[in-house]
Amino acid sequence: MTKALKINKNTDQGVQEFLKVLLENNKVKGVFTLKKISKDGSIAYSLITDPDQLNDAVPFYPLMPVNAGKLLSRFTLKGSTKKPIVAFLKPCELRGFVELIKREQGSLENIFIISSTCGGVYPIKMSLNGALDKNLSKYWDTVKKGEISPDLRPACKACTEFIPYTADITFDLIGNPELDKQCVLFLNTKKGEELAKDIKGELLEKKIDSKKLDNICNKRETEKKKIFGELETKMKGMDGLIEIFGKCIGCHGCSKVCPICYCKLCGFENSDFEYKPSNYEADFRKRGGIRVPPGTLFYHLGRLDHISISCVGCGSCEDVCPVDIPISIIFKKIGESVQKMFEYIPGKNVEEEIPLITFKEEEFAEVEE
Amino acid sequence: MEKNDEFMPKILAFLCNWCSYAGADLAGTSRIKYPPSIMPVRVMCSSRVDPVFVITAYLGGFDGVFVGGCHPGDCHYQKGNYYTRRRFASLKKIFEEMGLESERLRLSWISASEGPKYAKTAKEFTEKIKELGENSAKSKIFM
């Protein structure tokens, strides 16, 4: 049984009050959260230290401009802040952050993680023309009912990992009909309990309602099957792959936003992979022509090989793809099957090793022929 | 002489210096006959083989890619081949899921004393690739 805190205010106000108290009592130095940065509704991740600025903070806004796990990793790469900060992360962002910590690209020191059960986010494009703001009330209605909003990112519609694993505090959002009246925080760790000490509210002994969440999980599972099934019909052999990835313009945006692709100097942008005259000649002879730029399929297959074991399925890659390749679904599908093979859930546990840097002596006998 | 029109696969083989390469050498010095389809690349350890090498070879048009290493427990570097095994399992899974022919990839453990096993493996793999036919990636332009 975990401890929970009930604040008798609606979720937006509850969160803001919670954060204000933290900042004013000097418990934390700053708050890392989504924030409105201009009147036209632009939203960006910010680190807020001034309590007055909190009025514009919108921690649960259904948008992921960049995977915050990646941002937080950059923030803590060279060491942590001296005073603690609070970070609001969506479950997949948190998992991405944990995977980066395993790769020594960040640290949890002096960071309180606050997360929530997640109803998914909208594509970035929707935030640009104001469509997202109009949809907002509809979004929260579906979240309350525990249903899948239409127009979400495909990766979010098919997401079954919407409960954070390693958060200190979890906000109960999805499937919670009382969002307008009260907000409930689950204090998962000692750190979380410590943090919520000074907040006015009712302390409960409560467990997150697993029946309700299972129900939502089943809905998402059905949606996932449908989306994966559609992909399967397209992704058949070399010809299918060429059709899917043929549109790729080689911007490598998908790797730039990927929380797992952390290399500063990506191997696939290395000059070693540039085509030399001899390569062109060889391809002309062998294939009778060549796609320009070459190596599209190579890039995507190579990236799959690098990150599929840790892909958290956040969907950022598809969000930035200018030619709408269903890349997040491809990576999610293949990632999940690779992860299943190693019985590994990326981002579940900071202590667990990445499967490719460890082994058991007796395993995978079927791989060897 | 074999007939010209018969398909002879081209197989790229990454052989580890301490076991499989020595095994291949033994097959040669013992004068065991096996098909001339295999092009060996000597690597110090099978775990030196980045799966991206295998992808490159496959997309480049090799009909098969073979990785040979020491038997589990016998690795010259103690545990290299265990890592290879995991990487290879993951790569094969990716190929299967993408609908590519994962049968064109093969991992075998061949020790320095197993010349006959090397020849047998080479024969078997070549036969299998012959059944599969040419790698379709070879003639694709839009990759």
Image: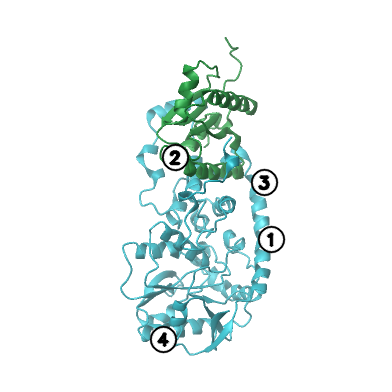
Residue at the disc numbered 3: A233
Residues behind callouts 1 and 4 on a single chain:
yes
Residues behind callouts 1 and 2 on a single chain:
no
Residue at the disc numbered 2: B47
Which of B126/A366 is in front?
A366
Mark 4, other Cα within 10 Å: few <14 / some 14–19 / many ≥20: some
Mark 2, other Cα within 10 Å: few <14 / some 14–19 / many ≥20: many
Q: CA distance from mark 2 to mark 3?
A: 35 Å
Letter of the chain that mark 1 sits on in the rendering: A
Residues behind callouts 2 and 4 on a single chain:
no
Quadrant of image for the N terminus of chain A: bottom right
- The percent coordinates of residue A195 (x first, y second) are 43, 81
Residue at the disc numbered 4: A21
Residue at the disc numbered 1: A222
Q: Tell me, by letter, which chain the rendering colours cyan.
A: A
- Kind of residue indicated by mark 3: Thr
For residue A69, side relative to residue A140 (left or right):
left
